[in-house]
Amino acid sequence: MTNAPSESTIPMEELLGHLWADYAEINPQASRVAKLLSARGETVVNDHIALRTFDLAPIGLQTLARPFLESGYQARDTYRFPNKKLQAQHFEPPRADWPKVFISELVVAEMPTSTQAAIRGLVEQVEESHAARTDLCTSGRPWSLSFEIYQALREASEYAAWVAAFGFRANHFTVLVNGLDGFPTLQALDDFLENQGFALNDVGGKIKGSAATLLEQSSTLASNVDVSFADGDHRIPGCYYEFAKRHPQADGTLYQGFIAASADKIFESTDRGQD
Ligand code: NI
């Protein structure tokens, strides 16, 4: 007898498909970039998917990681972002055609008291059964949110406001530049995208990192999207698309980790949006 997955288990490929479909709907620039690249004969390889949450039970980083670990992903390095009060961990897939997963969480206890109260007011609305879903990471926003609270959160933490407004979905997917034939450098891809009218996040320079740090990254600015709040629709920054060029380590294999100093700046791709 084989070990059949329980009924509530979603196959990883289906989960990754849901994550992309939801992300592409909210971030049409990702589909436009993917189309432009495939029109040039490129096959887009996803380097990693980024997920965000609050470090509160029952929805912390390790809860979001569960389905990936159950599908054979391995927990790897942890990261701290003291200025943004974030911590993160990355997970490596058991198959080369699955992306890495980078999960971050806001350390809520390090936020001002009023911000903590607002966030706890959202997380208290999450049913245990919702948090137990295998597809929690692509289940959207499980709480009601007013635009006033969103704006108050935004003053304290752009990250907190993003999680409050969008809930559980991919914050970004990432094109692996090494997987493209016609773009030998990240700069070449960035130039192509800017010529096509995409605005790139220039916080800390458009390219974060270098060959010396083994990872170069750039990203679009988030697309503005209409989001429903308890008191009506408002247009706010949503998701962005990231581009990563990995460099070989001393043993010749490509570096697979992340650089905290670069990720710190990449997080700011959702601080302002583009129409
Ligand atoms: Ni990323």
Image: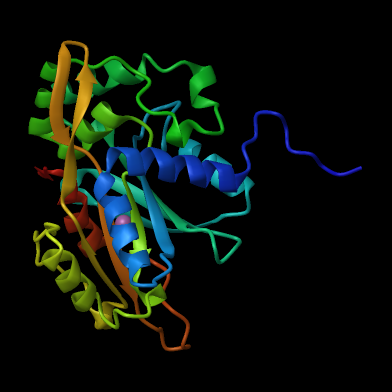
Left or right: 12 in relation to 139? right
Seen in the picture, residue 152 relative to 70 is either above or below; the reply is: above
Residue drawn at point x = 55 percent, y = 59 percent: 93
In depth, the one of 179 and 182 nearer the eye is 182
Quadrant for residue 151, please give it.
top left
Left or right: 218 in relation to 182? left
In depth, the one of 218 and 233 nearer the eye is 233
Q: Quadrant of ligand 1?
A: bottom left
Seen in the picture, residue 70 relative to 260 is either above or below; the reply is: above
At which x and y percent is residue 221? 15, 51
Residue drawn at point x = 29 percent, y = 38 percent: 26
Quadrant for residue 4, please give it.
top right
In depth, the one of 30 and 239 nearer the eye is 30
Q: Is residue 105 visible?
A: yes
Residue drawn at point x = 11 percent, y = 17 percent: 148
Seen in the picture, residue 215 relative to 243 is either above or below; the reply is: below
Instruction: State how the image is colored.
Output: rainbow
At which x and y percent is residue 128? 51, 18
Q: Residue furthest front?
A: 39
At which x and y percent is residue 8? 65, 29
The N terminus: image quadrant: top right
Residue drawn at point x = 12 percent, y = 59 percent: 197
The C terminus: image quadrant: top left
